[in-house]
Image (cartoon, rainbow, N blue to C red):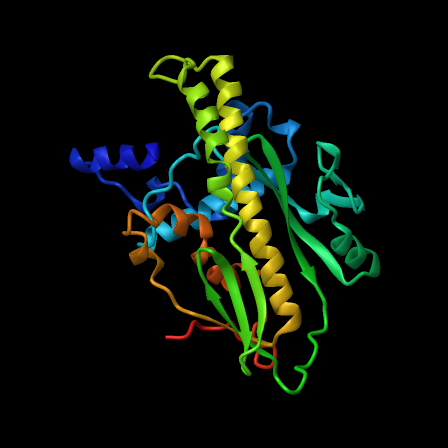
């Protein structure tokens, strides 16, 4: 950005600015610039794996490409302390077993969730890890693997099994087959309402601590209190996602075509009385799960994602 500003100032003063005056924004250009200046800009660069910088350059190059294409704004620096992440190449990552992964320059890390399925694929030789992204959020670290897996998609079973899903507030998901039989009924656990008192108590304590202000760092007591607030938010989000994952996994395993009613959730949120309850139900996230990978191969015969009924 400083290079662009210097060239802009030269243009305003009438100086000639050639194309070579601008620093390149392609990945190879950024990589070359990094090699030239890394010793002065980041003398600690040898402490990290080289693939971290390669992926950072690739992401920055893509951000500049999106900016030049008019899809986004000018790239900015990532905010420190908010969802910090880095990416490692698959070659520098190895699964020791279903609960341990070895990361370059970090060493062996134990995971909370089992990686049994991925580990079995790697043992059989039917998968390979392309990259792994480590993300820190609310004090928790998450590993996201990008893997290439060879699998056989089963042929559709005749007759096609169809289910229609309706969403609500008292009963979160109601499912019925084409003959009218009710086969699914999930009561709304009201994740947010059940933890609202706990969240309010944690927020009240944090508000009485010395928080961050301009030119003043937050106190350690505020950091601990704020961490308790973030833990409650994470608990709510994880419980909600877990229910969605369990329901959508059951549906995709037992039905070939799933029909979900198309709701104007954004419009319904204008109702102040029901807005909190509708947001807590996460209808949009449940329906959008087909895009995020939760409802995969809804139409197993054609391999197409399901479109909502209009």
The residue lying at 30 percent from left, 37 percent from top is 4
Residue placed furthest toward the bottom: 159
* Position of residue 141 measured from the top left corner of the image (x, y, whole percent): 62, 36
The residue lying at 64 percent from left, 28 percent from top is 46
Asked where in the image residue 112 lies, by quadrant, the reply is top right
From the viewer's perspective, is residue 207 above or below residue 193? above
Q: Residue 168 or 57: which is nearer the viewer?
A: 168
Q: Is residue 243 left or right of residue 116?
A: left
Q: Residue 129 or 266: which is nearer the viewer?
A: 266
* Position of residue 47 measured from the top left corner of the image (x, y, whole percent): 65, 27
Can residue 293 be seen in the rendering of this structure?
no
The residue lying at 47 percent from left, 12 percent from top is 219
The residue lying at 43 percent from left, 71 percent from top is 308
Q: Is residue 123 left or right of residue 265?
A: right
Can residue 262 be seen in the rendering of this structure?
yes
Query: Which of the image's four quarters has the C terminus?
Result: bottom left
From the viewer's perspective, is residue 133 above or below residue 205? below
From the viewer's perspective, is residue 65 above or below residue 253? above
* Position of residue 251 measured from the top left corner of the image (x, y, whole percent): 61, 67
Query: Which of the image's four quarters has the N terminus?
Result: top left
From the viewer's perspective, is residue 116 above or below residue 212? below
Q: Residue 43 or 278: which is nearer the viewer?
A: 278
């Amino acid at each position: 950005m400083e290079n662009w500003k210097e060239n802009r100032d030269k243009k305003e003063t009438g100086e000639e600015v050639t194309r070579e005056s601008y620093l390149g924004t392609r990945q190879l250009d950024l990589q070359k610039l990094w090699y030239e200046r890394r010793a002065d800009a980041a003398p600690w660069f040898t402490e990290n794996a080289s693939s971290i910088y390669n992926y950072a350059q690739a992401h920055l190059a893509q951000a500049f490409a999106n900016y030049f294409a008019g899809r986004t704004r000018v790239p900015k620096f990532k905010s420190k302390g908010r969802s910090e992440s880095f990416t490692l190449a698959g070659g520098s990552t190895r699964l020791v077993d279903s609960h341990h992964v070895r990361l370059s320059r970090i060493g062996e890390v134990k995971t909370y969730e089992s990686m049994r399925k991925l580990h079995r694929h790697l043992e059989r030789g039917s998968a390979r890890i392309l990259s792994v992204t480590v993300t820190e959020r609310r004090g928790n670290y998450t590993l996201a693997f990008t893997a290439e897996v060879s699998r056989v998609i089963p042929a559709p079973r005749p007759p096609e099994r169809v289910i229609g899903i309706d969403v609500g507030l008292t009963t979160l998901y109601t499912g019925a087959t084409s003959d009218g039989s009710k086969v699914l009924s999930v009561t709304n656990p009201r994740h947010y309402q059940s933890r609202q008192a706990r969240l309010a108590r944690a927020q009240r304590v944090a508000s009485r601590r010395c928080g961050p202000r301009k030119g003043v760092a937050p106190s350690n007591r505020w950091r601990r209190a704020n961490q308790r607030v973030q833990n409650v938010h994470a608990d709510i989000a994880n419980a909600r996602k877990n229910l969605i994952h369990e329901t959508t996994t059951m549906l995709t395993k037992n039905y070939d075509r799933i029909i979900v009613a198309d709701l104007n959730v954004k419009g319904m949120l204008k109702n102040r009385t029901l807005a909190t309850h509708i947001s807590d139900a996460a209808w949009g996230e449940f329906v959008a799960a087909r895009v995020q990978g939760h409802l995969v191969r809804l139409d197993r015969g054609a391999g197409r994602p399901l479109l909502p009924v209009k």
